[in-house]
Image (tube, rainbow, N blue to C red):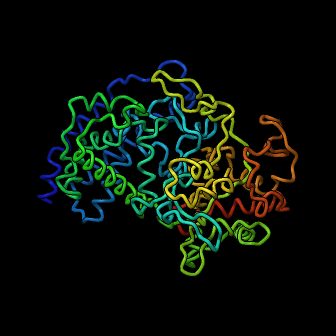
């Protein structure tokens, strides 16, 4: 305890600086922001909750005697909830991944309208909806399974966080958003380390990683450089001008930061296995009649649900995903602001030069692009066009209140579990219609964004009644963590 007190003696003073920064006016983007006005109050509420969780975690770190494992996990939690690690000091990793929404998007109004979330520069949106971080730590390093004839593992919707470098897809995923111009938008990985070196948890990090972690000679203009949104200019891809030795230290510490975040995301706080389903499997609860009927349908050969969303087998955790990718034949979600990001913003950055003609090729685009680390995978790119990673179904219905809207699938096109199951059931049965048609999502479906490689074997015409759809929905709701035995 005494040693911990020495390490955190400056934490309260640093916390005071942090709170001052939060209340300080920022140079926000001006008119033309795409954030719906109806979402602003909800966003502010989420930001306050992020601040509260960060402050509570700092207090816990200062006052509790923690073993090494707890220290790593709590450091990762502090990093996960730290808004200072974004270019405008306004967006933590948690902004898109809050516990009350199953570590997916926590803003109901954004889920309902834009599906994608604004970045630190609030006029920039990504092309996809936030993916849940819950149970993502179980995803293996991306590899090709010759017997399955499929890629398995990785992180992100397009699997591009392979895990090959850090032996952890989740750690490599954690390194993406801070440098993504549409997300946290820092201009250089060294900026993450620079910002972290000025945070209250620096001493804790040095205790875990060694004194060399922040022993970097920073250029005098580092703060100015790191306050400029990315991407970095092509002519100056590493704008924090460090010596090779200091660059090496910065990269090593950036890796440690990512690994700490992954440790938190792999902890029991994020992955508690505490749903009603888990209690039923342990013999400590029973399904209601409709839940049990839904589970039987889920596992039946008629629906194929269990083939991709596996509920476990010999030696398997019931994770409700097989870590592969599939093209479900989803229509594009034209409400996503990304389609309108074809003009340079005030910083000269255009996120989507293709504008309305953009097509999300998913894993296929990753395999065709420069981020693909294995040339043996490149010939497979065409067969993966339109495929996106199969998410876990755990916490698929977790929400902070009954009227909270969740966005499902990679583009957030579907916004209720009923819509999801209905799409799987009727995609190939109902007629095609245009987006906005009065019968859309009920009696008709718009054309798929990517007709290539569509999964026609496991969905599209399941022959279920509406009542059977409802039973599957009832079962899916039993996958929400935090179940209390005896509750209905």
Instruction: State whether residue 230 appears in this view.
Output: no
Residue name at image x 74 percent, y 63 percent = 471
Q: Quadrant of the N terminus?
A: bottom left
Q: Is residue 151 above or below residue 352?
A: below
- From the top left corner, tell me how far across and down residue 165 is, in percent: 41, 59
Q: Is residue 400 left or right of residue 450?
A: left
Instruction: State whether residue 28 appears in this view.
Output: yes
Q: Please tell me in which quadrant of the rendered image residue 282 appears.
A: bottom right
Spot the residue most to the top. Answer: 31
- From the top left corner, tell me how far across and down residue 385 is, in percent: 67, 51
Q: Quadrant of the C terminus?
A: bottom right
- From the top left corner, tell me how far across and down residue 390 is, in percent: 62, 59
Q: Is residue 231 left or right of residue 142?
A: left
Q: Count up the numbered dots.
A: 0
Q: Is residue 5 left or right of residue 380?
A: left
Q: Is residue 296 above or below residue 251?
A: below
Q: Please tell me in which quadrant of the rendered image residue 261 appears.
A: bottom left
In front here: 74 or 219? 219
In front here: 451 or 311? 451
In front here: 142 or 98? 142
Residue name at image x 52 percent, y 53 percent = 372
Q: Please tell me in which quadrant of the rendered image residue 354 appears.
A: top right
Residue name at image x 37 percent, y 53 percent = 258
- From the top left corner, tell me how far across and down residue 378 is, in percent: 59, 56
Residue name at image x 37 percent, y 60 percent = 263
């Amino acid at each position: 305890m005494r040693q911990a007190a020495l390490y955190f003696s400056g934490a309260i003073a640093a916390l005071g600086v942090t709170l001052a920064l939060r209340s300080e006016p920022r140079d926000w983007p001006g008119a033309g922001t795409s954030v719906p006005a109806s979402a602003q109050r909800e966003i502010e509420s989420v930001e306050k909750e992020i601040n509260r969780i960060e402050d509570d975690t700092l207090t816990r770190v200062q006052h509790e005697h923690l073993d090494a494992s707890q220290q790593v996990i709590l450091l990762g939690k502090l990093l996960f909830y730290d808004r200072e690690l974004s270019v405008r000091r306004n967006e933590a990793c948690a902004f898109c991944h809050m516990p009350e929404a199953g570590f997916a998007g926590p803003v109901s109004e954004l889920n309902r309208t834009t599906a994608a979330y604004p970045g630190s520069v609030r006029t920039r949106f990504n092309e996809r909806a936030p993916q849940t971080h819950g149970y993502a730590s179980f995803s293996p390093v991306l590899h090709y399974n010759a017997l399955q004839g499929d890629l398995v593992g990785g992180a992100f919707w397009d699997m591009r966080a392979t895990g090959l470098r850090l032996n952890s897809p989740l750690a490599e995923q954690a390194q993406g958003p801070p440098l993504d111009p549409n997300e946290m938008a820092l201009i250089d990985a060294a900026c993450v380390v620079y910002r972290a070196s000025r945070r209250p948890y620096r001493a804790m990090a040095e205790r875990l990683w060694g004194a060399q972690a922040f022993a970097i000679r920073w250029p005098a203009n580092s703060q100015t450089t790191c306050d400029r949104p990315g991407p970095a200019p092509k002519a100056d891809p590493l704008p924090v001008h460090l010596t090779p030795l200091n660059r090496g230290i910065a990269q090593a510490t950036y890796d440690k930061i990512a690994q700490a975040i992954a440790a938190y995301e792999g902890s029991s706080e994020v992955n508690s296995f505490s749903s009603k389903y888990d209690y039923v499997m342990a013999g400590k609860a029973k399904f209601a009649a409709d839940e049990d009927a839904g589970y039987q349908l889920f596992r039946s050969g008629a629906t194929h649900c269990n083939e991709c969303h596996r509920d476990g087998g010999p030696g398997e955790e019931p994770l409700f995903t097989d870590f592969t990718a599939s093209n479900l034949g989803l229509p594009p979600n034209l409400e996503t602001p990304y389609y309108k990001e074809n003009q340079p913003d005030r910083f000269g950055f255009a996120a989507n030069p293709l504008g309305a003609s953009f097509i999300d090729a998913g894993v296929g685009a990753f395999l065709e692009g420069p981020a693909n680390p294995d040339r043996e995978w490149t010939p497979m790119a065409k067969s993966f066009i339109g495929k996106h990673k199969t998410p876990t179904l755990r916490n698929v219905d977790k929400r902070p209140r009954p009227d909270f809207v969740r966005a499902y699938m990679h583009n957030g096109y579907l916004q209720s579990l009923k819509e999801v199951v209905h799409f799987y059931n009727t995609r190939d049965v109902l007629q095609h219609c245009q987006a906005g048609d009065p019968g859309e999502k009920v009696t008709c479906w718009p054309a798929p964004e990517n007709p290539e490689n569509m999964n026609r074997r496991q969905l599209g015409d399941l022959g279920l009644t509406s009542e059977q759809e409802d039973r599957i929905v009832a079962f899916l709701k039993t996958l929400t963590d935090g179940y209390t035995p005896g509750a209905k």
